[in-house]
Amino acid sequence: MMPFYKKLLFSSCACLLLSPVAHAFVEDSDARRAILELRAQMRQSQLARAELQNQIQALQQEVANLRGMVESSQGQSLNSDASLNSVNNPQVGDPQQQQSYDQAMDLYRQGLYTQAANAFSSFSKQYTSSPLTPKAMFYEGSARYASKDYKNAIAVLNNVVSSFPNDSTAPDALLVVAAAQVELNQIKDAKQTLLRIQKFYPNTAASDTATERLKYFK
């Protein structure tokens, strides 16, 4: 038989465990444990976000480097006839044809790229066999790139390369294609375009530029 003092102690313990104070203690412990778990989860989430942010910043820096290369060469490959491997635009016997081309070029030099693109497009469609047509198409694509119409710029410039692969504008056209692909975040395609320049147009200024730009691709 249990001694009286043990019964009293047992009863006191039981009362304590069943009392509101005991419940509060248990609930408080659960709450603290939940808070600690939540804090741990928050720390993990913060670390994950920080890692993601680092990755995003690295990608943004890579794209910025590529865009910097594009912008630094725009004045060479987009804004002057000298960029086309120092080849002057051929003159044509038809004064109206020459005037049409010159008017489109004036729009381009003024920075009116949308109007210039439309003017060069009209020229190419009207004078399909003109010696100026490859350059008109090149400048149309370049103007569309400058006006941020990247998809159409790629289409026009690829047409230059497929229609006039031996023209001096072809490798420069591919450089602008690669630049447009970078703007569209088509990084793998841009790399392939630059490799294409190296393969099909070696020993050209465009190939040298492609080699430099490829350094920014991992």
Image: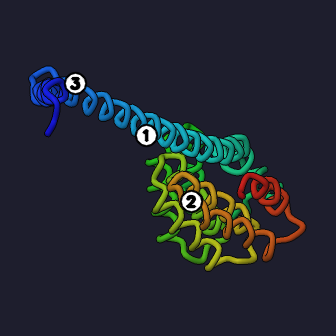
On the image, numbered disc 3 is attached to which residue?
25
- Nearest the viewer among 4 and 80 is 4
Q: Few, some or many C-alpha atoms within 10 Å of disc 2 (few <14, some 14-19, many ≥20)?
A: many
Q: Secondary structure at mark 3?
A: helix
Q: Few, some or many C-alpha atoms within 10 Å of disc 1 (few <14, some 14-19, many ≥20)?
A: few
CA gap between label 3 and label 1 equals 30 Å
On the image, numbered disc 1 is attached to which residue?
45
Q: Amino acid at mark 2?
A: Gln
Query: Splitting the image into 4 quarters, where does residue 218 fall?
Result: bottom right
Residue 61 in percent (x, y) is at: 63, 41
Q: Nearer the viewer, mark 1 or mark 2?
A: 1
Residue occupying the point 67% across, 48% down? 66
Q: Few, some or many C-alpha atoms within 10 Å of disc 3 (few <14, some 14-19, many ≥20)?
A: few
Q: Is residue 213 left or right of residue 176?
A: right
- Nearest the viewer among 85 and 131 is 85
On the image, numbered disc 2 is attached to which residue?
181
Q: Amino acid at mark 3?
A: Phe
Q: Does residue 198 lie above or below 41 as drawn?
A: below
Q: Is residue 2 left or right of residue 180?
A: left
Residue 78 in percent (x, y) is at: 66, 49
CA gap between label 2 and label 3 equals 63 Å
Q: Nearer the viewer, mark 2 or mark 3?
A: 3
Q: Is residue 64 left or right of residue 33?
A: right
Query: Splitting the image into 4 quarters, where does residue 64 fall?
Result: top right
Is there a contact, CB below 8 Å, between mark 2 and mark 3? no
Q: Does residue 155 lie above or below 217 as drawn?
A: below
Is there a contact, CB below 8 Å, between mark 3 and mark 1? no
Q: Earlier in the sequence, mark 2 or mark 3?
A: 3
